[in-house]
Image (cartoon, grey):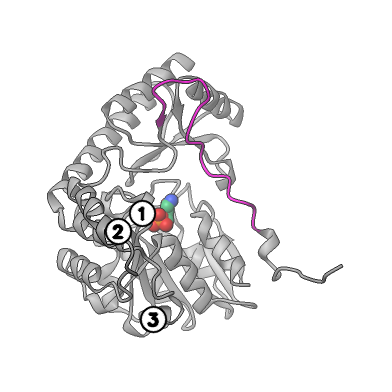
């Protein structure tokens, strides 16, 4: 018998279950379980993917200079302080590997994104779940949970799966109140859906203990290509670059992301579509007795009277070819998270919930 065992913490991580992407026997299936852009990526990104085919025998860029430049130009950021990863998942993992480890505590909110806990455990650190206030990030609770072992504090703003967000003054108060050895990570995966919101970039620039993460998987419609990025103090970005594999992003992904972020008109159309149909969906569901908190993201968290009702509704939606996300794993057993789809999808969801009721 061998004595090969994983590091402590690894076996506390459940295998990823994911959302279903098909329904046996149903026709016209619509997937609304992963907060993808229902309109797809910019046509310019698709063209970039096609054009990239001629170069796939070459290794990709190692420094991502062209994509970092495009992000910097478009959002007014310093490209030297940007790091690109295979999804923002990879930036979250780099942060845990570099700044947490055995003995370190990694704070995340009660209904926070699952990868914070997974990456903390994978790095050998201890994840610490901090309560929210009515499904909203609670800065006082986070500050109260800090100890001398706290190394990372993750908040998503807007948050997944609640859709709620906190204001810039609250985020700044959190950054100011952290102990000196703790780094605040502002996960802006859904920041692109909030008109005029910088995701926390100004706070990153004003302080030395804040990092922002962003993604191309949501508004930019490139979840399948895995592109995310982080923005932070130069010393921190330099540290993360030491553990980043030189070829962590494919050439195809880099070119598509660059085309996508430069197509600001298309991004604006997608943002407007989302705002319009998110409001319509939330209102129509509320009229059917299924309320949700005001969502700042590209999904609504529909709250049912009980877990039994939420699961029965999910089962019924599936028979109608509609795949939404159960969030019991996020301590929200009475709720279903529904991505804002295209007009047809939104209308089909409301018709199905109405028939279910
Ligand atoms: N953060 C949050 C809050 C998310 O919801 C997601 C995607 N579900 C991610 C990060 C990771 O996205 P990606 O790795 O595709 O960039």
Q: Position of residue 305 (x, y in %)?
A: 54, 28
Is residue 253 visible in the rendered image? The answer is yes
> Which quadrant of the structure image shows residue 351?
top left
Residues at circles 3 and 2 in contact by the CB criterion of under 8 Å: no
Residue 296, relative to residue 350: is it above or below?
below
What segment is highlighted magenta in the picture? Answer: 13-30
Residue at 40% across / 35% down in the picture? 32
Q: Which residue is denoted by mark 1 in the rendering?
A: 225
Q: Which residue is denoted by mark 2 in the rendering?
A: 252
Alpha carbons under labels 1 and 3: distance apart: 25 Å
Q: Position of residue 57 (x, y in %)?
A: 33, 64
Residues at circles 2 and 1 in contact by the CB criterion of under 8 Å: yes
- In the picture, the disc for residue 236 is 3
Callout 1: SS: helix
Q: Position of residue 39 (x, y in %)?
A: 26, 38
> 117 or 138: which is nearer to us?
117
Residue at 43% across / 43% down in the picture? 34
Residue with the most extreme right position: 1
């Amino acid at each position: 018998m061998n004595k090969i065992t994983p590091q402590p913490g690894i076996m506390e991580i459940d295998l990823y279950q994911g959302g279903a992407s098909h329904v046996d026997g149903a026709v016209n299936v619509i997937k609304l379980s992963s907060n993808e852009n229902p309109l797809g990526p910019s046509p310019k990104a698709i063209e970039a993917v096609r054009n990239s085919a001629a170069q796939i025998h070459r290794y990709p860029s190692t420094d991502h200079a062209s994509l970092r430049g495009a992000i910097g130009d478009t959002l007014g950021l310093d490209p030297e302080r940007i790091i690109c990863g295979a999804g923002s998942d990879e930036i979250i993992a780099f942060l845990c590997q570099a700044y947490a480890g055995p003995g370190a505590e990694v704070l995340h909110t009660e209904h926070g994104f699952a990868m914070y806990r997974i990456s903390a455990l994978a790095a050998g650190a201890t994840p610490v779940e901090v309560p929210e206030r009515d499904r909203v990030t609670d800065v006082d609770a986070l500050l109260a949970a800090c100890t001398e072992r706290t190394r990372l504090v993750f908040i998503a703003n807007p948050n997944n799966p609640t859709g709620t967000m906190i204001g810039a003054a609250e985020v700044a108060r959190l950054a100011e109140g952290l102990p000196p050895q703790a780094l605040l990570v502002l996960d802006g995966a859904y920041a692109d859906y909030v008109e005029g919101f910088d995701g926390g970039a100004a706070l990153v620039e004003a302080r030395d203990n804040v990092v922002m993460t962003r993604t191309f998987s949501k508004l930019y419609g490139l979840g399948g290509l895995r592109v995310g990025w982080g923005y932070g103090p130069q010393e921190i970005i330099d540290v993360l670059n030491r553990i980043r594999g030189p070829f962590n992003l494919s050439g195809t992904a880099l070119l598509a992301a660059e085309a996508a972020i430069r197509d600001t008109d298309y991004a604006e159309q997608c943002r407007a579509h989302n705002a319009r149909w998110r409001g319509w969906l939330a209102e129509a569901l509320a009229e059917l007795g299924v309320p949700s908190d005001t969502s700042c993201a590209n999904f609504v968290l529909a709250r049912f009277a009980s877990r039994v009702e939420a699961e029965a509704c999910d089962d019924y939606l599936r028979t109608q070819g509609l795949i939404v996300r159960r969030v019991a794993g996020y301590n929200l057993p009475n709720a279903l998270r529904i991505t804002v789809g295209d007009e047809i999808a939104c209308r089909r969801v409301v018709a199905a919930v109405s028939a279910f009721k």
